[in-house]
Image: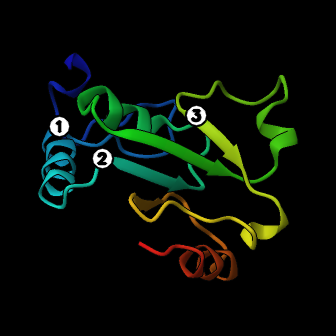
Amino acid sequence: LDVFEGEENYREPLLVWIRPSLSLVHFIQQELSNLGISKLSSVGCGCGTLEWIIQSIVPEITITGYEVNEGWWESRHATPHFIRLEYVEDKGNNLELPSDSALLFCYFNNIDFFHTYINNYKG
């Protein structure tokens, strides 16, 4: 938890986003608990750094990351994975996201894919 101590606006120079505060992760934990949700499906999670941070503080949550381009993510050039990844084929058309999980979309930049994922979610 030491990573969460100190200045709230701290930015890790090797990451392209601001790290979440401990209070934000606790908020996510509380809301998932209030809703009785113990699974998180993260679409477009990359290596899963944010999800790993959440899981390190909320170990009872099961997280699955969904990514495209398996060739890249399994290559020697890709960053290490911090969570389990499942690879999406056919632009997500055949992906059935678990209905008992919360959805998290990270750095999502394709509105058509976004709508496909939403339509395939029955939760």
The nearer-to-camera label among 2 and 1 is 2
CB under 8 Å between discs 2 and 1: no
Q: Nearer the viewer, residue 25 or 97?
A: 97
- What's under tag 2, amino acid-wise? Ser
35 or 111: nearer the eye? 35
Q: Is residue 68 above or below residue 8?
A: below
Q: Mark 2 or mark 1, which has the lower sequence index? A: 1
Counting the numbered discs, the total is: 3
**Mark 1 surroundings: few (<14), some (14-19) or many (≥20) residues within 10 A:** some
Name the secondary structure under disc 1. Answer: helix
Furthest toward the top, the residue is 2
* Discs 1, 3 touching: Cβ within 8 Å: no
Kindly report the distance in space between the C-alpha atoms of the residues bearing marks 2 and 3.
16 Å
* Image quadrant in which you'd find residue 7: top left
Q: Which mark is in front, 1 or 3?
A: 3
Query: Could you classify mark 3 by the number of other residues whose Cα lies within 10 Å: few (under 14), some (14-19), or many (20 or more)?
Result: few
| Residue that numbered label 1 is attached to | 22
Colouring convention used in this rendered image of the protein? rainbow
Residue beneath label 2, please? 38
Type of amino acid at the residue the image marks with label 3: Arg
Say which residue appears at 18% left-offset and 61% top-offset. Answer: 35
The residue at 75%/30% (across/down) is 78
Give me the C-alpha separation between circle 1 and circle 3. 23 Å
Residue 99 or residue 26, whichever sits in front: 99
Question: Where is mark 3, residue-wise?
Answer: 84
Image location (x, y in percent) of residue 18: 36, 45
**Structural distance between the alpha carbons of marks 2 and 1:** 19 Å
